[in-house]
């Protein structure tokens, strides 16, 4: 039934006033109450959920059922809160709710069941689409893009990075970027840029050379951006580079011509003005 009886179940709060999905179970793990915010998700399930074991909710895989069953048992034993995803069908696909379980106690402190508080996340289909679009953008970008985790190991390496360096994705994934792919004289400076990005201090337009698999020097202009999780925690760095080898060669040639011209003027056996 809807959770109008929360106060009678030992709660001193009005669950209907909280804009979060909330449910209750008894000691058997059977759903006994839920508020209207949770009901909107249950409405998409054809089965009647009241009296249903939490681990038997439609849409849970066998692994999911085992996970929920373990979480309920641990919570009923008084262990710290556990969280897991529940997927509910909607008209446009499905929606994910992160459900956190805590022990529910009576006035004497005895555990009488479980209270679950949900946190709605984004549409699963939309999340998958965005993730796929982002991955496609990285893979097909006309710029070398790499990623490292918080330990400095490569976890992203797009096609352009592979084309410029000659190292395939399979050859670099899981390897230490600085020690394996940066020349010794630039390891400290590149390492410092990446370390700063891992502390949230991003760097733009940092120049350094890369050496390809065949030993050819490639000049790279790097932007190092902090990579964060959905909760804002720093999980790595994304580096977006630009191959400026030809530009640097052109600048060197211009400098050489200018120097030759200056030498010609200085050594000419005739007055030049």
Image: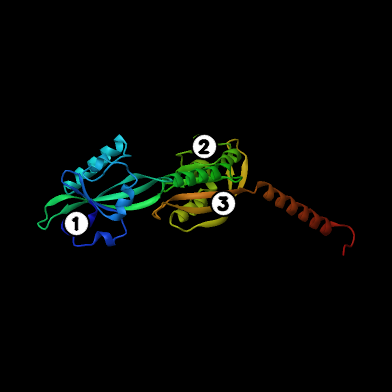
- Which disc, if any, is residue 226? none
In this rendering, position of residue 28 left or right of residue 180: left
Please state the horizontal and vertical placement of residue 217, each as a whole percent of the image. Answer: 62, 42
Q: Earlier in the sequence, mark 3 or mark 1?
A: 1
Please state the horizontal and vertical placement of residue 54, each as a whole percent of the image. Answer: 24, 43
Please state the horizontal and vertical placement of residue 157, each as a whole percent of the image. Answer: 52, 41
Closer to the eye: label 2 or 3? 2
Q: Quickly name the residue at label 1.
A: 5
CA gap between label 2 and label 1 equals 57 Å
Q: Earlier in the sequence, mark 2 or mark 1?
A: 1
Dot 2 alpha-carbon crowd within 10 angstroms: few under 14, some 14 to 19, many 20 or more: some
Frontmost residue, 213 versus 89: 89
Please state the horizontal and vertical placement of residue 63, each as a whole percent of the image. Answer: 30, 36
- Which disc, if any, is residue 222? 3
Task: Please say if the residues under marks 2 and 1 sit with CB atoms less than 8 Å apart.
Answer: no
Frontmost residue, 102 versus 120: 120
Q: Is residue 241 above or below residue 69?
A: below
| Residue at the limit of the structure toward the right, as seen here | 270
Q: Quickly name the residue at label 2.
A: 169
- Residue located at (47% from left, 59% from top): 201
| Residue at the limit of the structure toward the bottom, as seen here | 273
As helix, strand or loop, the secondary structure at mark 1 comes to: helix
In this rendering, position of residue 33 left or right of residue 207: left
Q: Is residue 30 above or below residue 267?
A: above
Frontmost residue, 39 versus 181: 39
Q: Earlier in the sequence, mark 2 or mark 3?
A: 2
- The quadrant of the rendering that contains the C terminus is bottom right
As helix, strand or loop, the secondary structure at mark 3 comes to: strand
In this rendering, position of residue 175 left or right of residue 11: right
């Amino acid at each position: 039934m809807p959770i109008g009886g929360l106060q009678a179940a030992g709660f001193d709060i009005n669950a209907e006033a909280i804009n979060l999905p909330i449910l209750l179970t008894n000691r058997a793990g059977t759903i006994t109450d839920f508020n209207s915010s949770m009901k909107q998700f249950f409405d998409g399930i054809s089965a009647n959920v009241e009296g249903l074991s939490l681990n038997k909710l439609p849409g849970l895989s066998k692994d999911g059922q085992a996970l929920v069953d373990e979480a309920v048992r641990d919570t009923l034993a008084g262990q710290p809160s556990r969280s897991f995803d529940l997927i509910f069908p909607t008209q446009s696909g499905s929606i994910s709710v992160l459900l956190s379980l805590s022990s529910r106690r009576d006035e004497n402190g005895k555990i009488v069941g479980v209270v679950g508080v949900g946190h709605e996340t984004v549409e699963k289909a939309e999340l998958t689409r965005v993730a796929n679009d982002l991955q496609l953008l990285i893979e097909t970008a006309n710029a070398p893009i790499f990623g490292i985790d918080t330990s400095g190991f490569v976890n992203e390496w797009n096609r352009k990075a592979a084309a410029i360096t000659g190292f395939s994705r399979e050859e670099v994934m899981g390897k230490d970027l600085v020690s394996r792919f940066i020349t010794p004289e630039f390891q400290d400076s590149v390492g410092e840029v990446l370390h700063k990005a891992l502390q949230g201090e991003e760097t733009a337009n940092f120049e350094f050379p890369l050496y390809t698999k065949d030993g050819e020097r490639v000049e790279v202009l790097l932007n190092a951006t902090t990579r964060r999780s959905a909760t804002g925690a720093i999980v790595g760095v994304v580096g977006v580079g630009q191959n400026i080898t030809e530009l640097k060669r052109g600048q060197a040639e211009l400098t050489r011509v200018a120097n030759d011209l200056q030498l010609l003027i200085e050594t000419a056996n005739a007055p030049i003005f």
